[in-house]
Image (spheres, rainbow, N blue to C red):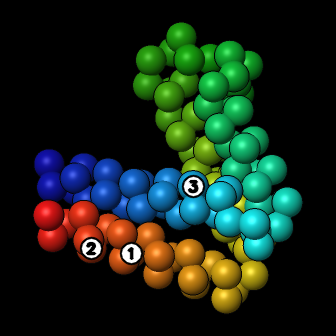
């Protein structure tokens, strides 16, 4: 069960990184468009595997969204990626102290 908790915390940090990237004006348009494509894919009723198939449909959404989000972070310049990651880590540490 602790693995699910760790996975959830990792996913929260990655989503926070993407949210910070979307709000940062220095982020390239390609990174922002790729992140938005991930969100649209999850919300779209058109999928590679239908969401009516309980586990496979959801897994499909998760894997494609994860790959698109990883691609979005690759479009970031290294210094901006490091700055945003530090910002997210700082916020996570501040939240954990509360």
State the residue position of label 3: 19
Residue 60 in the image: x percent, y percent? 58, 34
- Residue 48 appearing in the image: yes
Observer-nearest of 66 and 54: 66
Q: Disc 3 on helix, strand or loop?
A: helix
Residue drawn 70% across the image and 50% down it: 35
Q: Are marks 2 and 3 in contact (CB under 8 Å)?
A: no
Of the image marks 3 and 1, the number of the one nearer the N terminus: 3
State the residue position of label 1: 89
Q: Disc 1 on helix, strand or loop?
A: helix
Q: Is residue 78 left or right of residue 52?
A: right
Q: CA distance from mark 3 to mark 1?
A: 13 Å
Observer-nearest of 62 and 39: 39
Quadrant that contains the C terminus = bottom left
Q: Residues within 10 Å of mark 3 (few under 14, many from 20)?
A: some
Residue drawn 71% across the image and 27% down it: 48
As drawn, 50 above or below 10: above
- Residue 70 appearing in the image: no
As drawn, 49 above or below 4: above
As drawn, 25 above or below 40: below
Residue drawn 50% across the image and 28% down it: 58
Q: Are marks 1 and 2 in contact (CB under 8 Å)?
A: yes
Residue 7 found in image quarter: bottom left
Residue 18 in the image: x percent, y percent? 59, 58
Residue drawn 53% across the image and 40% down it: 62
Q: Is residue 49 left or right of residue 97?
A: right
Q: Disc 2 on helix, strand or loop?
A: helix
State the residue position of label 2: 93
Of the image marks 2 and 3, the number of the one nearer the N terminus: 3
Residue 41 in the image: x percent, y percent? 69, 33
């Amino acid at each position: 069960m602790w693995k699910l908790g760790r996975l959830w915390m990792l996913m929260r940090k990655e989503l926070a990184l993407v949210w910070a990237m979307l709000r940062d004006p220095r982020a390239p348009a390609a990174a922002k468009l790729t992140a938005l494509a991930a969100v649209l894919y999850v919300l779209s009723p058109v999928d590679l595997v239908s969401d009516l198939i309980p586990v496979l449909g959801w897994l499909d959404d998760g894997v494609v969204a994860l790959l698109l989000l990883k691609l979005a972070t690759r479009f970031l310049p290294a210094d901006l990626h490091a700055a945003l990651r530090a910002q997210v880590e700082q916020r996570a540490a501040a939240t954990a102290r509360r």
